[in-house]
Amino acid sequence: MKVVIDREKCFMSGECYYNHPELFKMGEEGYPEILIEDVTDEEHLRHAREAIEVCPAVAISLTE
Ligand code: SF4
């Protein structure tokens, strides 16, 4: 599955890259960058779902 970040919604609060540095890092201008494009590992998927739950902007999603 792929992690997608909607930059239009993201307001750079940083929860995703502070809580899950294996999946995200702070990129240009404070927007998160995704480090693992195709997430297949179960633990990574669990962390991606956690990031989706805590993102205050509802900017993160998983797609096939
Ligand atoms: S947690 Fe959400 S709003 Fe905050 S930086 Fe990550 S994607 Fe953007």
Image (cartoon, rainbow, N blue to C red):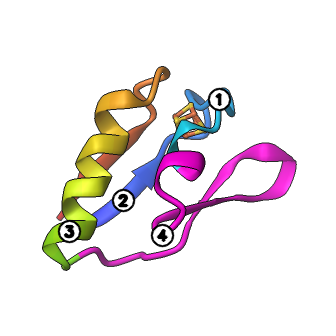
Residue 30 versus residue 20: which sits nearer the camera?
20
Residue 11 versus residue 41: which sits nearer the camera?
41
Real-space Cα separation, disc 3 to disc 2, in angstroms: 14 Å
Residue with the mark numbered 2: 3
Q: Total label count?
A: 4
What segment carries the magenta color?
Answer: 17-39
Give the side of residue 50 with respect to residue 25, left or right. Answer: left
Determine the secondary structure under disc 4. loop
Give the side of residue 23 with respect to residue 25, left or right. Answer: left
Real-space Cα separation, disc 4 to disc 2, in angstroms: 13 Å
**Dot 1 crowding, Cα within 10 Å, few <14, some 14–19, many 20+:** some
* Badge 3 vs badge 2, beta-carbon distance below 8 Å: no
Q: Residue 2, how many percent across, how many down?
A: 31, 66
Q: Quadrant of the N terminus?
A: bottom left
Residue 45 versus residue 6: which sits nearer the camera?
45
Residue at x 41%, y 75% (from the top left corner): 37
Q: Is residue 43 above or below residue 7?
A: below
User: Would you say residue 13 is visible in this rendering?
Assistant: yes
| Magenta region includes residue 20 | yes
**Ligand 1 contact, mark 1 (Cβ < 8 Å):** yes
The numbered mark, 3 or 1, whose residue comes first in the sequence reads 1
Under mark 2, the amino acid is: Val
Residue ranking furthest to the right: 29
Residue at x 44%, y 30% (from the top left corner): 55
**Dot 4 crowding, Cα within 10 Å, few <14, some 14–19, many 20+:** some
**Dot 2 crowding, Cα within 10 Å, few <14, some 14–19, many 20+:** many
Real-space Cα separation, disc 1 to disc 4, in angstroms: 17 Å
Residue with the mark numbered 3: 43
Residue with the mark numbered 1: 13
| Magenta region includes residue 62 | no
Tell which quarter ligand 1 is in.
top right
Residue with the mark numbered 4: 22
